[in-house]
Image (cartoon, grey):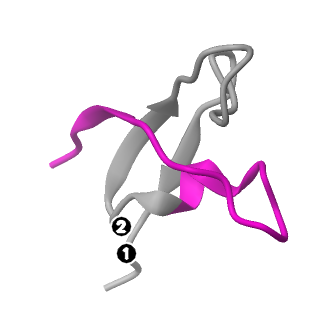
Amino acid sequence: MKTRIETYCQPSNTDKYASHSCTSMKTRIETIAFPGTQYIRHGSQLYFHENKD
């Protein structure tokens, strides 16, 4: 079962584009943020995380 969620994550000090790693496995995520803030926008990028059980 896959869920589509919108995640809002604060960027890491070392990798400000790592917001897609703030979610749990087995989830289809689309990260959305707002320009001019500490958030990063990934509106056109989808990340797929699967558990290989």
Please state which of residues 41 and 30 is positioned toward the viewer in this rendering.
41
Please state which of residues 6 and 16 is positioned toward the viewer in this rendering.
16
Position of residue 41 relative to residue 8, above or below, is above
Q: Give the CA distance from mark 2 to mark 1.
A: 6 Å
- Which amino acid type corresponds to the residue marked 1 in the rendered image? Asn
Q: Where does the image place residue 3, in percent across and percent down from the top left?
A: 21, 39
16 with respect to 42 (left or right): right
Residue at the image position 33 percent from the left and 51 percent from the top: 27
Is residue 49 magenta-colored?
A: no
Position of residue 30 relative to residue 43, above or below, is below
Residue bearing mark 1:
51
Specify the segment rendered in magenta.
1-21
Task: State yes or no: discs 2 and 1 in contact (Cβ < 8 Å).
Answer: yes
Question: Residue 31, which numbered label?
Answer: none
Q: Where does the image place residue 34, in percent across and percent down from the top left?
A: 60, 15
Q: SS for tag 2?
A: loop
Question: Residue 25, which numbered label?
Answer: 2
Q: Where does the image place residue 7, in percent across and percent down from the top left?
A: 39, 38
Q: Which numbered disc, 2 or 1, marks the residue that appears first in the sequence?
A: 2
Which quadrant is the C terminus positioned in?
A: bottom left
Q: Where does the image place residue 30, in percent across and percent down from the top left?
A: 49, 30
Q: How many marks?
A: 2
